[in-house]
Each structure stands twice: as structure tokens, then as C-alpha cells.
């Protein structure tokens, strides 16, 4: 049983933007998400990030910009006492035909290899869109939809969410998961 939580980035950890989050200044954390990540880490969970970043492939921002965004995210989580086990991103344009762009599960395969996991038994995939959940379900993760980011729109469509747990935000999911673990 893996104590692993895989998170989408935009809309789960930080505020999302239809115009893309293009640099570290535009990368604005959801404060409750930063503390939730730290709480999960302190409770013994490995935290991974699997994020589509097609803005890189579209030329909206550079690899250096993406690295600066992730450095900011790591700094904020570490300041709360947390840590990421893995951060994986798909840089490709949606038409590129890669295997890493969610809803495909290539990013999860990368995480599995990096963390030397046999499987995703007991792991959770937390996202704000159906494609996040589909990527996780494709590898046996439990699907968790948060209403932040595009989550409310995803919930309103009510397609493909039969097996998903739904929470207001990452902090509420964290409360639930830590409560489940405590009562197990």
C-alpha cells in the first residue's frame, strides 16, 4: 500500500489562469494547499506533482520560467515543513502525440519509475479536471476532484466522475485523508 498523493498543479496547488501561468510572479499559491502538502508530508505521505504545461510547447514561457515557478512552489512547501518526492511535467503541445499529456498516464509512469514503485495501490490522484482523474485512474489511483481551479466546471459537467471523491479544496481532502488514516 503506497502512501502517495499525486497532485495536478494549476488549480490545485496554485491559482489557474485561462491565459496560462507564465512566470513565477503569475504563479500564486492557494495558501491552504501549501500547508496541506506540508501536513501530508509530515504524516508520511510522498507528494508528487503531475502537470500538463503545454504553454512551454506553445512558446508562452521558457523552460527557465517553468523552473522558476517550480522553485517557488518548492520553497513555499519547504517553508511549511513539507517536501515533494517528484515533480513531473508534460511540456508538449496538445497535438504533439506524446504519451505524457494527461489524460494519458505517462507522467505517472515517470513518477512510478523515479520513486521505484511497484504499483499505485493506495495512491490518490488529485486534480481539478477530468483528464487529471483519468490519468490517475488509468494507473489504479483513487480519483479526487477538488472544486478549486476548473473543478466547479468539471463537477457541473458530471461526466466520468462516478468513482471520484469530491472536496472543496486540497486542504479539505487532506483533513479527510488524515482522519481516515487515524481511524484505520
Image: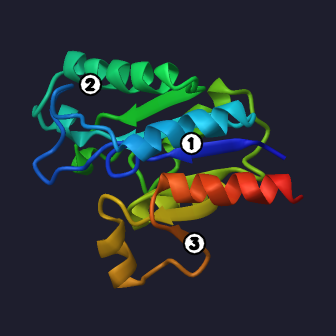
Nearer to us in this view, 182 or 88: 182
Q: Quadrant of residue 119?
A: top right
Nearer to us in this view, 50 or 34: 34
Q: Residue at x 22, y 43 (%)?
A: 93
Q: CA distance from mark 2 to mark 3?
A: 29 Å
Q: Which residue is mark 2?
A: 66
Q: Is residue 151 visible?
A: yes
Residue lying farthest to the right in this orientation: 184
Q: Residue at x 36, y 18 (%)?
A: 71
Q: Quadrant of residue 117?
A: top right
Is label 3 in a helix, a strand or a loop? Answer: loop
Nearer to us in this view, 32 or 106: 32
Q: Position of residue 16 (x, y in %)?
A: 24, 50
In the image, 47: left or right of 79?
A: right
Q: CA distance from mark 2 to mark 1?
A: 19 Å
Q: Which mark is residue 108?
A: 1
Where 57 sits versus 19, above or below? above
Q: Which numbered disc, 2 or 1, marks the residue that appears first in the sequence? A: 2
Contact flag, marks 2 and 3 (Cβ < 8 Å): no
Q: Residues within 10 Å of mark 3 (few under 14, many from 20)?
A: some
Q: Which residue is mark 3?
A: 164
- Check the picture and name the quadrant holding the C terminus: bottom right
Q: Is residue 99 visible?
A: no
Q: CA distance from mark 1 to mark 3?
A: 18 Å
Q: Residue at x 62, y 45 (%)?
A: 5
Q: Position of residue 92 (x, y in %)?
A: 28, 38
Q: Position of residue 105 (x, y in %)?
A: 52, 49
Nearer to us in this view, 66 or 149: 149
Amino acid at each position: 500500500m503506497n502512501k502517495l498523493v499525486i497532485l495536478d498543479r494549476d488549480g490545485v496547488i496554485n491559482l489557474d489562469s485561462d491565459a496560462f501561468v507564465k512566470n513565477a510572479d503569475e504563479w500564486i499559491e492557494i495558501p491552504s494547499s501549501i500547508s496541506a502538502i506540508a501536513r501530508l508530508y509530515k504524516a508520511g505521505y510522498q507528494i508528487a506533482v503531475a502537470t500538463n504545461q503545454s504553454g512551454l510547447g506553445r512558446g508562452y514561457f521558457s523552460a527557465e520560467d517553468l523552473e522558476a515557478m517550480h522553485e517557488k512552489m518548492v520553497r513555499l512547501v519547504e517553508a511549511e515543513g513539507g517536501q515533494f518526492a517528484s515533480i513531473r511535467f508534460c511540456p508538449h503541445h496538445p497535438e504533439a502525440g506524446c504519451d505524457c499529456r494527461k489524460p494519458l498516464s505517462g507522467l505517472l509512469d515517470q513518477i512510478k519509475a523515479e520513486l521505484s514503485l511497484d504499483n499505485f495501490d493506495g495512491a490518490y490522484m488529485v486534480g481539478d479536471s477530468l483528464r487529471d482523474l483519468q490519468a490517475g485512474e488509468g494507473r489504479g489511483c483513487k480519483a479526487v476532484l477538488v472544486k478549486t481551479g476548473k473543478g466547479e466546471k468539471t463537477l457541473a459537467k458530471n461526466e466520468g466522475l462516478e468513482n471520484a471523491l469530491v472536496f472543496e479544496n486540497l486542504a479539505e481532502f487532506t483533513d479527510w485523508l488524515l482522519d481516515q488514516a487515524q481511524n484505520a
